[in-house]
Image (spheres, rainbow, N blue to C red):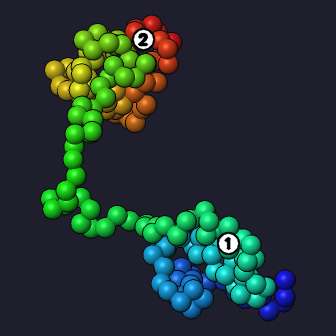
Amino acid sequence: METTVRKEIEALRKMTVSQLRQKHAEVFGEETRSHHKQHLFRRIAWRIQALAEGGLSERARRRALEIANDADLRVRAPKTAFQQDVDFSLNGAVNRRLGAESDPRLPAVGEEIAREYKGRSIVVRVLASGFEFDGKIYKSLSAIAREVTGTKWNGYLFFGLRAGEGDGNEKR
């Protein structure tokens, strides 16, 4: 690599994010949405090297075009994609959310999960749309574990549920 290119890349390391964004606009001819310093550094350094030493070979460019198949690639969906005026059919859509019965670690709907915690017996009933504990409905076992302990817990770990074991009532 030439010394001027090397010096230019080393200068990038000392730049702030806003300076890198300005440099990106100079080098690429367009602004970037990124505020990630390392990503900007790598992209700009690659572009500087490509301009100095030549970019992709013609063969690589043709192959990339074959792969992309000249498709209109988008980073984000158009703003109107999911508004009322869009005509699409829900006939093939799934109409129900997967319930607790879909997770093999959980017992069947209606059964209970029990655990002792600091001398307190914790009993949770599995519902089709969540979990019941102390007369309240929770979306997840983690929410119940957080309620009981006051700290964040993975609900499956807290209740000792493992894949392939359905009842979870054993102490682990």
Q: Is residue 18 left or right of residue 136?
A: right
Front residue of 119 and 155: 155
Q: Quadrant of residue 51?
A: bottom right
Q: Is residue 162 left or right of residue 131?
A: right
First-in-chain label (2 vs 1): 1
Give the x, y percent position of residue 88: 22, 52
Distance, label 2 to label 1, CA atoms, is 54 Å
Q: Name the quadrant of the N terminus.
A: bottom right
Question: At 29% from the left edge and 10% from the top edge, which residue is drawn?
Answer: 111
Question: At 74% from the left edge and 72% from the top edge, which residue is drawn?
Answer: 59
Residue picked out by circle 2: 166
Q: Is residue 83 left or right of residue 104?
A: left
Query: What amino acid is at disc 1?
Result: Arg
Front residue of 86 and 118: 86
Is residue 150 depicted above or below 86 in this figure? above
Residue picked out by circle 1: 62
Q: Is residue 64 left or right of residue 75?
A: right
Q: Quadrant of residue 80?
A: bottom left
Confirm or deny contact between disc 2 and disc 1 (CB under 8 A).
Answer: no
Query: What amino acid is at disc 2?
Result: Gly
- Mark 1: few/some/many CA within 10 Å (<14, 14-19, 20+): few
Assign a secondary structure to mark 1. Answer: helix
Is residue 26 depicted above or below 43 in this figure? below
